[in-house]
Image (cartoon, rainbow, N blue to C red):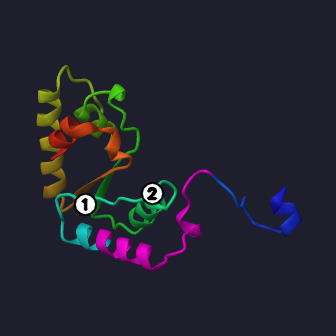
Amino acid sequence: MYEAFYGFKQKPFSLLPDPSFMYLGKQHRMAITLLQYAVLNQSGFVVVTGEVGIGKTTLVSHLTQQLGDNVTLGLMNNTHPSFGSIMQLVFGAFNLRDQFKDDGERLNIFKRFAQLKYQQDKRLLLVVDEAQNLGLDYLEQLR
């Protein structure tokens, strides 16, 4: 409807974050700069907080589009504990085949996966969207 009437090339309103429509205001520019700095310097953890709808997910999408081939991205956006253990969620984020009986096995396989990426001169980046759903136990396991 809007496309035909206003001559838009695509739908102007979407519930999904679209970094191509992102306006980088002062706060957003500062946040993206800090995120870029954290990725370049291999910071352990980075937390982006803000009110609902302020653009955190869009900001992270913008960042991930800028990543080079030397970064292997894992995106975890279904963070409710009912979806499985933290290691199951991490395996899903990196599209690793999960056929293991327990998290001990998963952890060992993930360590090998990380070592392989390191040997290939690649870095791992795990983005956890909606991390507030994880709870302290899961966050500690991630650490």
Q: Give the quadrant of residue 109.
A: top left
Residue situated in front as seen by the camera: 32 or 103:
32
Neighbours of disc 2 within 10 Å: few (<14), some (14-19), many (20+):
few
Image x and y of residue 71, in percent? 28, 61
Q: Residue at x 19, y 53 (%)?
A: 117
Q: Is residue 34 magenta?
A: yes
**Quadrant of the drawing holding the N terminus:** bottom right
Comparing marks 1 and 2, which lies closer to the viewer?
2
Q: Residue at x 27, y 31 (%)?
A: 88
| Residue type pointed to by label 1 | Val
**Residue 29, relative to residue 35: is it above or below?**
below
Q: Is residue 32 left or right of residue 120?
A: right
Residue situated in front as seen by the camera: 35 or 102:
35
Check disc 2 and report its element: helix, strand or loop: loop
Neighbours of disc 1 within 10 Å: few (<14), some (14-19), many (20+):
few
Q: Which residues are magenta?
A: 15-35
Q: Is residue 1 left or right of residue 71?
A: right
Please tell me which of labels 1 and 2 falls first in the chain.
1
| Residue type pointed to by label 2 | Glu
Residue situated in front as seen by the camera: 73 or 23:
23
Q: Residue at x 57, y 52 (%)?
A: 16
Check disc 1 and report its element: helix, strand or loop: loop
Question: Which of the numbered marks, if any, corresponds to residue 51?
Answer: 2
Q: Give the quadrant of residue 103.
A: top left
Q: Is residue 48 magenta?
A: no
Residue situated in front as seen by the camera: 67 or 77:
77
Pointer 1 with pointer 2, Cβ within 8 A? no
**Residue 37, relative to residue 11: is it above or below?**
below
Q: Give the quadrant of residue 94.
A: top left
Image x and y of residue 65, in percent? 43, 64
Label 1: which residue?
46
